[in-house]
Image (cartoon, rainbow, N blue to C red):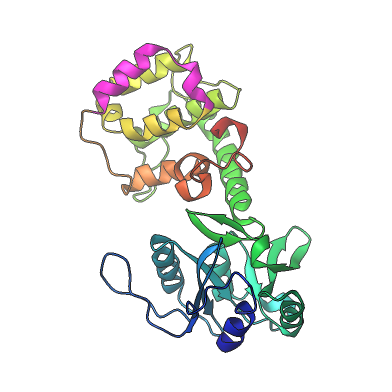
Amino acid sequence: MCDQVLELISLDPRYELGSGVVDGYLPPNGGGRGRWPDVRFNLDGLGKFAVEVQLAPSLATEVVARSKYYLSQGIHLIWLVPWYTFDRVTRAFTADIAQEAGGNLFVLDDSAVAASLERQTLCLWAAWQADTGMERRLISLDDLEYRSDRHPLFKDVATPAVFREASLRRESLIGELVRTKGDWSSAIVHPVTGERDSDFDRLLRVMFSMWAEADGRWTNFLNRQENLTGILNAYLNSQDGQCRAQIINDMLTRTRAVDQVRATVWDKMKDALRYPQISAEDSTISEAMSYFPEVYRGDLRGDPIRTDILPDWAK
């Protein structure tokens, strides 16, 4: 199959002669350990490509590692998986692979080979999970979307799924935030210890209040302040708020809430950011951020931001 991929792509008039290699070592830019892509080639106007033919299960960690490596090298990664029968392409390892390509899977079969020969370029089946089941489309590399911050994809179904899940999680927590407002004995529990945690509780309430303001349905989940400016001024002036200023700054500047606060907030923010900040790897910070992937997942927001897929409040 590797030889066949190279044979088909070499039919494309944009194929750069001598760039095609099967199972050849690819040294990294800047030193370190390189990779042995199954197939690599260059197309004039589209860039450098690596094709990995995955016919057997692979660990998710290896899938992610390869993905990150090729992104760092500015190389477009295409995974080819076996067709089996169409309802079986969702096997565990293909789910990991699809996640790295926006929920897409790519398959080369006899019909795709025939199309490739007819069109004189590499054609593949793109497959993805839709609400009504798996769907597929016969495509060429020209039909894919190319971005510097992610691998080529035909239809991004992974990002909307992440956003939908986050929206459901937020809505499920709102009732609890309203019910326990002002009752510190019922603070939201720490994501690791499972115990009541007032600092984590306050952070969530501030973030949810910012989100509500950005979404045009202002609600104060924390205290009796009349507006978001009052909440943030008080929070950024507190000891627990000062060491969490960065996460608050990111939430504010990446949502429509940025236009709803007064200048005093930015003064408080500037002062608070001088304090040592809790790392995003901290369990409470990462848990709080997980409620808002539209804000904190740079790979999903895109660079520049993907206005086509972000909700209005996060633009």
Inspect the magenta stretch and tell me whether residue 201 lies in it: no
- Tell me if residue 161 can be seen: yes
Q: Quadrant of the C terminus?
A: top right
Q: Nearer the viewer, residue 79 or 251?
A: 79
Q: Nearer the viewer, residue 19 or 93?
A: 19
Q: Residue at x 41, y 63 (%)?
A: 68
Left or right, residue 119 beside residue 227: right
Is there any visible trace of residue 190 in the rendered image? no
Lateral position of residue 217 relative to residue 284, left or right: right
Residue that appears at 57% across and 56% down: 146
| Residue 224, quarter of picture | top left
Q: Residue at x 48, y 39 (%)?
A: 295
In the displayed structure, 291 sits above or below 187; it is below
Q: Out of 79 and 172, give the one closest to the viewer.
A: 79
Name above or below for residue 106 compared with residue 151. below
Quarter of image, res 53 = bottom right
The N terminus lies in quadrant: bottom right
- In the rendered structure, the answer to whether residue 111 lies left or right of residue 13 reads right
Residue in the picture at 67% in, 57% down: 155
Q: Is residue 271 magenta?
A: yes
**What's the magenta bit mostly, secondary-structure-wise?**
helix
Query: In terms of image quadrants, where is residue 310?
Result: top right
Q: Position of residue 311 (x, y in %)?
A: 61, 36
**Count of numbered badges drawn on the protein:** 0
Query: Magenta segment range?
Result: 256-273
107 relative to 238 in the view: left or right? right
